[in-house]
Image (cartoon, rainbow, N blue to C red):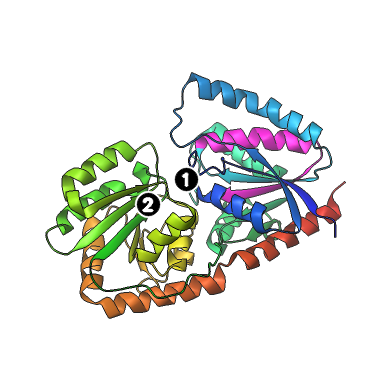
Amino acid sequence: MKKISILITSPSLNTLDNVSGIANLTGLLIQHNEEVEYYHFITGKKDRESRNAFLICKQCLLPAMFLLYLIRNFHIKILHFNVPQEYFAIIREGGLIIIGKLMRKKIIVHLRGGKYNKKEIEKYLLKIIFNKLLMLSDKIICLSDIEKIYLTQNYNIDTLKIAALPNAVKISNYIFKKDYSGTLKILFLGRIEKDKGLNEIITMLKNLSNRIDFQFMLCGTGAYEKFVTEKLNEAIADKFMNCGIVSGSKKDEVLGKAHIFLLPSYYEGLPNALLEAMAYGVVPICTPVGSVPSVINDKENGFLVPMYSADTIQEIIIDLNENRKKLEAISEIGYRDIKRKYSLSNYILSLNEIYSDLMVKAP
């Protein structure tokens, strides 16, 4: 059977350049979706790349590069845009979407997390661009029914135009035999940015250091990395392990050892790191932002805590450390939930239905 040709946008798939849930899932699709031939067009900046004159020039050239790419690959009928709900991303992807529409392509706008996820855009021009972006789309994909309701109510979009499709992870052949005894292992995995709640994590770990035996594993990279590592070295010293960027077998090893996953973010979409952690039985403690509440049932398969709540996180960790059977039970429930609801195979089936429907309508 002939494969469907799809252009998909995302940051670089090289984990050394970018620690991104969007890139991670895009890489999995390219690798495992056997019905689709993906053409990957890189957008966004690298994690360690500064917003300087060079980056601005590169972004200004992006529309021309995109147009040339479409001309060279004119047979592609469907463009799948991953759109973080952030200021620069909305402007960047909005320009590319206009070009795609002028080239008479079918447009999928796949809304990702960001500052404006389930939040009104206060900047007038940006709001116009975002509205136009949604109007030009042939299909909108959001991360949960929570987001779908928000979009229909606040942007007057036909509910049939929107598909709620939660992120997914590959369920590995990992054998569920996690060791729940000994030192409690606490994990942060993802982009190291201030808005991930890392200040609260540092404060909490400092207060926790004299109360229980733990090890904190920091995995990832980002603009806030130097500050965070310095503060953690000062606060918890020998209890801190800076793992850097993890992928492949190294990521499997870290997730296999970890007991608790921390993500007290100020905003999110549906973090892939959360799904990955739970797929390895790591108990999540997260803020109820974005579509996180669609995954975590508080006190059942994880914990939802208020924003900026270092004390609440600390109380939960102390309780789980003292009640390892409770930790194990919540861990196993989370693992089963991810395996049942967020498998990559089911995600690909749903996505291919969207592609097939648009191919029928393509010119």
Residue drawn at x 59%, y 59% as measured from the top left: 148
Image location of residue 337, percent across then percent down: 49, 74
Q: Quadrant of residue 64?
A: top right
Mark earlier in primary sequence (2, 1): 1
Residue drawn at x 43%, y 34% as measured from the top left: 48
What amino acid is labelled 1 in the image?
Val
Asked if 201 appears above or below 297 in the picture, the reply is: above
**Does residue 335 appear left or right of residue 106 in this picture?**
left
Between 162 and 120, the one nearer to me in the picture? 162
Residue 202 visible to an observer of this rendering = yes
**Does residue 146 appear left or right of residue 259 in this picture?**
right
What amino acid is labelled 2 in the image?
Ser
Image location of residue 62, percent across then percent down: 64, 28
Q: Mark 2 falls on what kind of element?
A: loop
Image location of residue 140, percent across then percent down: 66, 52
Cα distance, mark 2 to mark 1? 16 Å
Range of the magenta residues? 87-111
Query: Which quarter of the rendered picture does the N terminus lie within?
Result: bottom right
- Badge 2 local density, few (<14 within 10 Å), some, or many (20+)? many
Task: In the rendered structure, find residue 265 and report the number of the disc placed on it.
Answer: 2
Residue at the farthest front position: 249
Write down the residue under mark 1.
19
Q: Mark 1 falls on what kind of element?
A: loop
Residue drawn at x 74%, y 37% as measured from the top left: 100
Asked if 88 appears above or below 256 in the picture, the reply is: above
Image location of residue 182, percent across then percent down: 23, 70
Residue drawn at x 59%, y 44% as measured from the top left: 83
